[in-house]
Image: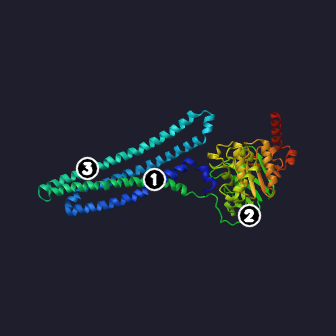
Amino acid sequence: IGLDQDFFDKWRTGDLMTRFTSDVLVLMRMMGILVIMLVDTIVLTTLTLFAMGNFVNWRLTFISVLPLPLIAIISLFFGRFIHRRFRELQEKTSELSNITEENVSGVDVVKLYSNYDTMQGIFDNKSQEFYNSYIRLVKVWGLMFPLAMLVGQLAIIFVFNFGGPMVINNQITLGDFIMTNQYIGMLIWPMMAVGNLINLIQRGRASLRRVNEVLEQKNSVKEPPRKDFEFQGHYQINHLTFKYPGSQRVVLNDINMNINPGEMIAFVGRIGSGKSTLAKLLVKLYPVDREQIFLDGKDINDVNGEFIRDNVSYVPQDSFLFSMTIRENIAFSDEKMEDKVEEFAKLSHVHDDIMSFENKYDTIVGERGATLSGGQRQRVTIARALAKRSKMIILDDCLSAVDTETEEEIIKTLRQQAEDKTILVISHRLKAVKNADQIYVFDDGQIAEHGNHNQLISREGIYYSMYMKQLIEKNLEE
């Protein structure tokens, strides 16, 4: 959770779940069983060899145990293959977990597009790959154990071959001969245990490597020590150019902007023009070069990201809700806010909807808020952001599922009730943001024009064309 956004953009949920469940379980088993088997093997082998040498015959003991180290050698040889095959198996497990998680999360899309066969085919392919990988591991395991058992039988043959004549020549008694065979049987288990130990170690190594790949991830955003100050929310952006980590595509190019405290700012423009990216940079979800973004006169690289996000309520496009009650989702574990939940719900225009539910604010919303409509989810997430009582609110196209009139009303209410707050609205509906103090029009990663509504209309540029097009579409609908 403490890693930055770049990590979660690259890693898939199913893969992470497998690494921190299946792989961690393998490590737990390895550590527990490894200690027991290691102690058991050392103690049993030492005591058995001592008993054979002292109570039977040291020469026969030495000869009879000669083949047994071969078991350990065989285990070491096959251990390399086990390590490789088990790592492959865990990778296939991650892939299967990914496709399962996606199918469950996107079940509505699958049903709406009647795309069962395609998704079933993808799932079947991943299942077959997992099965094939598991069989390859079992084949190595199945070949190693019979070979180890064969070597164990060689030790018995050695006892008969060398111990028999010793009985005939009265060098040892028949009882000693029988006891030697029993001792050899006792030694075969520790040697086989060596094979088990090596198998466990190789599996553990593969899982440890996969877990460490996650644990060794470093934040691309270098966070300075937290030093709190009076947050005003004054942003100054100077010639900002940005590419996502690991990508060569320029997403934002030479952005210049001032956001003053208490203002309402709007970002508009086509999809993919860089609006949401800039909003994420303002809350320091991704790293930027020095001297490109300043917050209250300080280079954003010198300000702790957690401090920024404590003072900025960011409502993303994806309206995520936890499988809790509506009240708990809005208060979000802040007991001080629970008594004011209804106040924030009214501000986000979702109170009436909630009161129509049987359990009202105690309604369980289901996984990801599945029991609510898209518009209701969006308005609940806005209520949650308001409950945070931060100095700045960013609405990142989070009202796309409500009608234009409702969006206008929500934004109007927010501005009236939060006069001292800075409000940044990203929207495709120009009518909803026409009262903003400053409107920035994005086009292909650049700011094409900016100003207030009247200024932009008078220029008859991109904003004017977009506004007139939406106005005509609205009139046609009516």
Say which amino acid is labelled 2. Lys
Q: Which mark is residue 298?
A: 2
Q: Residue at x 16, y 53 (%)?
A: 164
For this rendering, which residue is in front, 461 or 109? 109
Image quarter in which the N terminus is found: bottom right
- Find disc 3 in the rendering and name its residue: 153
Give x and y (percent) for residue 166: 14, 56
Label 1 or label 3, whichever comes before in sequence order: 1
- Is tag 1's residue or tag 2's residue first in the polypeptide sequence? 1
Q: For this rendering, which residue is in front, 102 or 321?
A: 321
Residue 423 visible (yes or no): yes
Distance (Cα) linking label 1 and label 2: 47 Å
Residue depicted at 80% across the width and 54% down the height: 417
Counting other residues with Cα less than 10 Å from the Cα at mark 3, is it few (<14), some (14-19), or many (20 or more)? some
| Three-letter amino acid code at the position of disc 3 | Gln
Q: Are marks 1 and 3 in contact (CB under 8 Å)?
A: no
Residue at 35 percent of width and 61 percent of height: 39
Q: Position of residue 106 (x, y in %)?
A: 61, 40
Q: Secondary structure at mark 2?
A: strand
- Circle 1 is placed at which residue position? 26
Q: CA distance from mark 1 to mark 3?
A: 32 Å
Kindly identify the residue that appears in the image at 82 percent across and 53 percent down: 416
SS for tag 1?
A: helix
Dot 2, how many residues are within 10 Å of its Cα: few (below 14), some (14-19), or many (20+)? some
Q: Nearer the viewer, mark 2 or mark 3?
A: 3
Q: Furthest-left residue in view? A: 169
Q: Could you say where residue 365 lies in the image, as x and y percent from the top left?
A: 65, 46
Q: Earlier in the sequence, mark 2 or mark 3?
A: 3
Question: In this view of the protein, can residue 441 be seen by the observer?
Answer: no
